[in-house]
Image: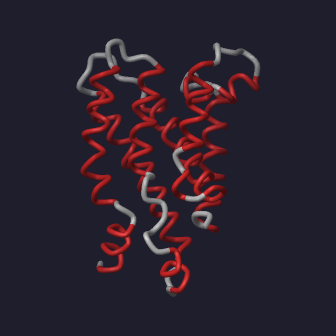
Amino acid sequence: MRPLVLYAQSRGVPAALVVLPVVVLVAWSALHSPWTPLSASLTTLAAVLVTTAGLAGQDPELDRSTAVPWPLWRLGHLLLAAVVAAISVLVVQELGYEPFAAAFVVRDTAGMVGLAGLAATVAGARLAATAPVLWWAVAAIMPPAESTLGRVVTWPLGAPDDVVTRWTAGVLFAGGIAAYSARGGHR
């Protein structure tokens, strides 16, 4: 149990767990009238940003010099971040009258966590938030598109039953999880 506690503390997990309900509740209460794909997706983005804030430890040298199976720890970290972020949004949105389908929240959470993992791997853990924020911003300003490329770009706001948006989020999730688990944050 001690290594798990040390890992969680070094990654800021306790602080994230304290801040997460506050951030999600504030985002939901500010955006839920009416609860639209844009506001639901933005609330999910906020939850993902909180849960993926600690993708690197305080001391990269210490991480490199220990005989810990880092790929498993990093895999568990991202999977737990995704589960906690999705659950927090699903629970908080039940306070309103028009909750979004769980498939929408889970899809957005998975894709955004994957993007955070990819950004951490490529650019470093400090910049892990840039990829999900930028992709969400582009999706938010683009008009709805019927083309496959348009649906790929706007996947965070697409219908939860759209195969293209689900595949896009799934590929981002799998790629981000695999890259971050194998390589960790860029130094």
Q: Quadrant of the N terminus?
A: bottom left
Residue 166 percent coordinates (x, y): 61, 34
Q: Quadrant of residue 157?
A: top right
Q: How many marks?
A: 0
Q: Is residue 163 left or right of residue 76?
A: right
Position of 18 with respect to 143 (left or right) is left
Q: Is residue 179 above or below residue 49?
A: below
Residue 95 point in image, percent of width and height: 23, 25
Residue 30: x, y in percent? 30, 22
Residue at x 59% of width, y 61% of height: 180
Q: x, y (%) of residue 66?
A: 50, 86
Decide: is 113 above or below 108: below
Q: Residue at x 64, y 18 (%)?
A: 142
- Which residue is at a point 31% across and 28% down the rendered structure image? 93
Q: Quadrant of the C terminus?
A: bottom right
- Closer to the camera in the image, 27 or 80: 27
The way the protein has been coloured in the rendering is secondary structure
Left or right: residue 103 compared with residue 159: left
The residue sitting at 63% across, 55% down in the picture is: 123
- Left or right side of 91 for 63: right
